[in-house]
Amino acid sequence: WNLTRAHKRAYKILKASHPSLQVGVAQQLANIQAKRPHNALDQTSTKWMRYFWNWWFLLRIKNQQDFVGINYYFTDYYIGLMKKADPTVPLNDMGWYMEPEGLYPLLLRTWTRFKKPIFVTENGVADYSDQHRQWWIEETLIAMERAISEGVDLRGYFHWSLLDNFEWKYGWWPKFGLIHVDREHGMKRKVRASAEWFGETVKHIRADQ
C-alpha cells in the first residue's frame, strides 16, 4: 500500500517537471500454472495466485505508468494452494523450473491487461556450467518474437546479467552472468560461450532489421 502511494506521488512529481518522461516500474512475474489444467479447483487457485503475485500492485498504478517492466525467471505449478513439483521440467542451479517459453503467456496477459509498451527488464538463468544459458536465451527470443507477432508492443529486452553478481538473498554463488567473474583470482573476467553466441545472434537480428 505504501509503495503504491509513493509511486503515484513520484509519478505526479516527475510528470509535472518533465511531461514527456517515460515512467514505469519493473515487476517480478511468475508463470503460474495449474498442475492439473482441467481441474476447477486448481484453475481457481491459479487465477488468484496470478492476481496476488503478478497483478495486484500493477493494477493499482495502471494510470501512473507509461510502460510495464517484467522480470521473468521461472514457472511454478500448483495443486490447490500448494506448489507442486514437475519432474518433466529441468531445474536451474537455484532449483527454479526452467521454462523460458513461459515468458510468452506472461507477455500476452500483461498486454491484454494494460495495453502499454512492455520491457523485459530482467530475464536470465543461474547456470554455473553454462550448459543451459544459450538454450534459455534462444527460447526466450522465440517467445518474444511470437508475442510481438500477435500484437504485443514489446520495446526491449535486458538479460540478467552481464556479470556474475551478488544476489541480495543468496550471495555470490548463483552464476547469472554472461561473463564469469573469478573471485578467487582477482575478479578476473571470462566471457562465457553463451555470451559469444548471444552477441553473434544480436548482430544477425540487427542486420536483418
Image (cartoon, rainbow, N blue to C red):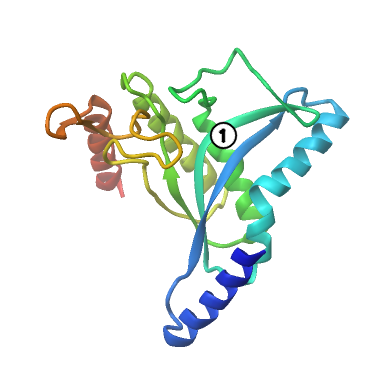
Label 1 neighbourhood size at 10 Å, few (<14), some (14-19), many (20+)?
many
Question: Of residues 106 and 150, which is closer to you in this image?
Answer: 106
Residue at 66%, 35% (x, y): give it. 32
- Which residue appears farthest toward the right when viewing the image? 40
Report the residue at 43% width, 45% height from top: 122
Q: Is residue 154 above or below residue 136?
A: below
Q: Disc 1 on helix, strand or loop?
A: helix
Q: Residue at x 30, y 42 (%)?
A: 205
24 with respect to 190 (left or right): right
Q: Residue furthest bottom?
A: 16
Q: Position of residue 123 (x, y in %)?
A: 43, 40
Q: Position of residue 166 (x, y in %)?
A: 34, 39
> x%, y% of residue 71?
49, 46
| Residue type (three-letter) at the residue carrying disc 1 | Gly
Q: How many marks?
A: 1
Residue 169 screen position, x and y as percent: 46, 38
Kindly identify which residue carries mark 1: 102
**Foreground of the two, 173 or 25:** 173
Q: Is residue 16 above or below residue 197?
A: below
Q: Residue at x 48, y 87 (%)?
A: 16
Q: Quadrant of the N terminus?
A: bottom right
